[in-house]
Amino acid sequence: MSSESRSVSQIVADREHNIWVSALGIGLYHYRITGNPPPQSTPTHFTESSAGKHKISHDVVSCVRPGGNGKIWFGTVS
């Protein structure tokens, strides 16, 4: 995350051991973990100003939860 980070609300791992970070004011980050030790990560940043499939309804993401179906659920203020 950038040095402009506000407040991290949650950090969770999905069933594929990728990391999801929800933040208040800067959206949602997904870190896809790949490779053998040392692991590498490829970050994806989801915001309300992102284009296409990376767009979310609001940059304040208060919670993130992995679903039983392999999907990720997250809550925003709108």
Image (cartoon, grey):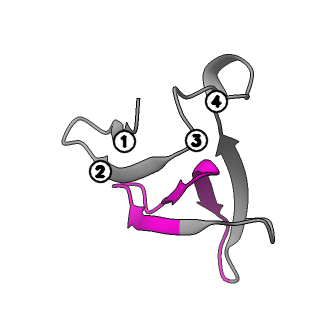
Give above or below for 70 relative to 57. Answer: below
Could you tell me how far apart the alpha carbons at marks 3 and 2 are, in whole angstroms? 17 Å
Circle nearer the N terminus (1, 4): 4
**Point 73% across, 55% down: residue:** 42
Q: Where is residue 6 shown, x and y percent of the image?
A: 63, 66
Q: Is residue 3 left or right of residue 20?
A: right
Q: Which residue position holds label 3?
A: 59
The reply to whether dot 3 and dot 2 touch (C-beta < 8 Å) is no
Q: Which residue position holds label 2?
A: 65
The reply to whether dot 2 and dot 1 touch (C-beta < 8 Å) is yes
Residue 12 is inside the magenta segment:
yes
Q: Amino acid at mark 3?
A: Asp
Q: Which residue position holds label 1?
A: 74
Please tell me whether mark 3 or mark 2 is closer to you in this view: 3
- Secondary structure of residue under mark 3: loop
Q: Quadrant of the C terminus?
A: top left
Circle nearer the N terminus (3, 2): 3
The reply to whether dot 1 and dot 4 touch (C-beta < 8 Å) is no
Q: Which residue position holds label 4?
A: 48
Q: Where is residue 10 shown, x and y percent of the image?
A: 40, 65
The reply to whether dot 4 and dot 3 touch (C-beta < 8 Å) is yes
Residue at the left extreme of this rendering: 68
